[in-house]
């Protein structure tokens, strides 16, 4: 809106017409009364999700089914670990006799992985249809594709697998699917979290998490998912490292590498975890003992906003350097990440930084409004 008015000289009404939005003013400049906002209703879970929530305790007991146990062993996932993570199984049945069975007919012969999200518990199911002992995951995938059976089926709401790491860890290793998360957990990487195709919501990430590793597959789908998650994390002030399976003969993804070679197949991720642990315990003594200022160094008021200044004096101090020329999209994202990281570290609060174009100059520089805090 403001961009069109600044560059093209459009009036407010002309800009509204170009953007095909309704102006809140009538032709005389008098505000039009706004319609009352309808309260946003919480998402209603799908019928299959409600049924799965009801039968989930029984499905967990069915994980001991010989077929489910054999599949876990073939993927190199210890049964005790899967049971601890809440993995369940729904055995196949001949005919759906009850309404409950009809609702979950498409979920039979699947390993069920519990998912967590602000909208409540959800599930994703990995199909075991057509799998036989001795068949690896790629042969099984070809059969599922041939018969047009989706490998994974997810409820609404969806969510993240092993999301409790957000409450316990200061570093998170993000992976694509629950099988990858199980492989990493079995290999000793305790902070693994599977996004399971769900868009990452920065609001669910606690302030104390400042670093993350993106351990996605090296194919196009994995690279795209890693870029999307990295963009979200950078804008939240979280630094990221992308580690994909190396191009060797040890396996195409982390799950296969662990199945074939155990912890040796996860060597790059284990090395990253070791470096992260050493960085956390080797904080310089001067930095560890430094005390944050408790009052503004100019006027003495509290609370301190950043670098020993209250908000008013911080804005005054920074106003001279608000002209930021962006040379690329990566440069723009870097500036946003720097702002978010600074605010996150100095205030101990969760921030979402929104960059609002205020004025465009001929050299493609943008004058930024001072960041506004959102709790």
Image: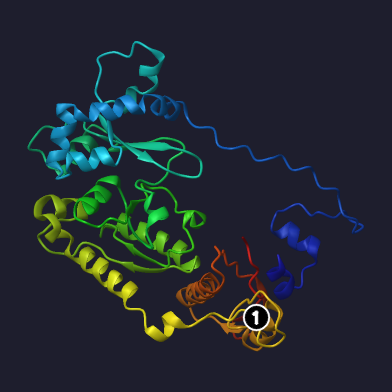
| Residue located at (16% from left, 33% from top) | 69
**Farthest residue toward the top?**
97
Horizontal relation, residue 88 to residue 167: left or right: left
Say which residue label 1 marks.
295
Category of crowding for the residue at label 1, using alpha-carbon neighbours closer than 10 angstroms: few (below 14), some (14–19), many (at least 20): some
Question: In front here: 194 or 5?
Answer: 194
> Residue 15: x percent and y percent?
74, 63
* On-image quarter of the C terminus: bottom right
Q: Can the viewer see residue 165 in this picture?
A: yes
Q: In the displayed structure, would residue 250 be above or below residue 60? A: below
Question: In front here: 368 or 205?
Answer: 205
Q: Secondary structure at mark 1?
A: loop
Q: In the displayed structure, would residue 303 be above or below residue 269? A: below
Question: In front here: 44 or 145?
Answer: 44
> Residue 72: x percent and y percent?
17, 38
Colouring mode (rainbow / by chain / secondary structure / one colour): rainbow
Q: In the displayed structure, would residue 358 be above or below residue 73? A: below
Horizontal relation, residue 14 to residue 165: left or right: right
> Residue 78: x percent and y percent?
17, 43
| Residue located at (31% from left, 24% from top) | 58
> Residue 213: x percent and y percent?
33, 64
């Amino acid at each position: 809106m403001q961009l069109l008015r600044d560059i093209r000289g459009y009036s407010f009404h002309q800009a509204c017409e170009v953007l095909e939005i309704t102006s809140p003013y009538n032709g005389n400049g008098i505000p039009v009364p706004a319609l009352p906002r309808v309260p946003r209703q919480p998402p209603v879970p799908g019928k299959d999700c409600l049924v799965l929530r009801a039968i989930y305790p029984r499905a967990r007991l069915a994980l001991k089914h010989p077929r489910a146990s054999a599949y876990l062993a073939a993927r190199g996932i210890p049964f005790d670990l899967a049971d601890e993570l809440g993995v369940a199984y729904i055995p196949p049945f001949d005919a759906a006799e009850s309404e409950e069975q009809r609702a979950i007919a498409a979920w039979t012969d699947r390993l069920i992985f519990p998912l967590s999200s602000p909208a409540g518990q959800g599930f994703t199911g990995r199909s075991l249809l057509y799998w036989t002992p001795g068949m690896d995951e790629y042969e099984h995938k070809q059969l599922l594709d041939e018969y047009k059976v989706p490998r994974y089926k997810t409820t609404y709401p969806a969510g993240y697998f092993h999301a409790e790491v957000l409450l316990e860890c200061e570093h998170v290793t993000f992976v694509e699917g629950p099988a990858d998360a199980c492989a990493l957990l079995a290999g000793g990487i305790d902070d693994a979290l599977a996004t399971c195709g769900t868009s990452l919501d920065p609001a669910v990430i606690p302030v104390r998490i400042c670093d993350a590793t993106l351990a996605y597959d090296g194919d196009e789908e994995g690279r795209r998912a890693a870029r999307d998650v990295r963009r979200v994390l950078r804008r939240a002030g979280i630094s990221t490292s992308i580690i994909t399976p190396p191009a060797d003969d040890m396996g195409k993804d982390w799950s296969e590498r662990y199945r074939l070679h155990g912890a040796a197949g996860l060597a790059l991720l284990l090395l990253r975890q070791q470096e992260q642990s050493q960085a956390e315990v080797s904080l310089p003594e001067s930095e560890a003992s430094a005390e944050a200022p408790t009052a503004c160094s100019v006027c003495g008021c509290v609370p301190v906003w950043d670098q020993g200044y209250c908000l008013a004096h911080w804005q005054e101090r920074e106003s001279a350097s608000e002209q930021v020329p962006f040379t690329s999209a990566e440069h723009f994202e870097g500036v946003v990440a720097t702002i978010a990281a600074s605010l996150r570290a100095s205030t101990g609060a969760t921030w979402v930084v929104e960059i609002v174009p205020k004025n465009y100059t001929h050299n493609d520089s943008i004058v930024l409004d001072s960041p506004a805090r959102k709790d």
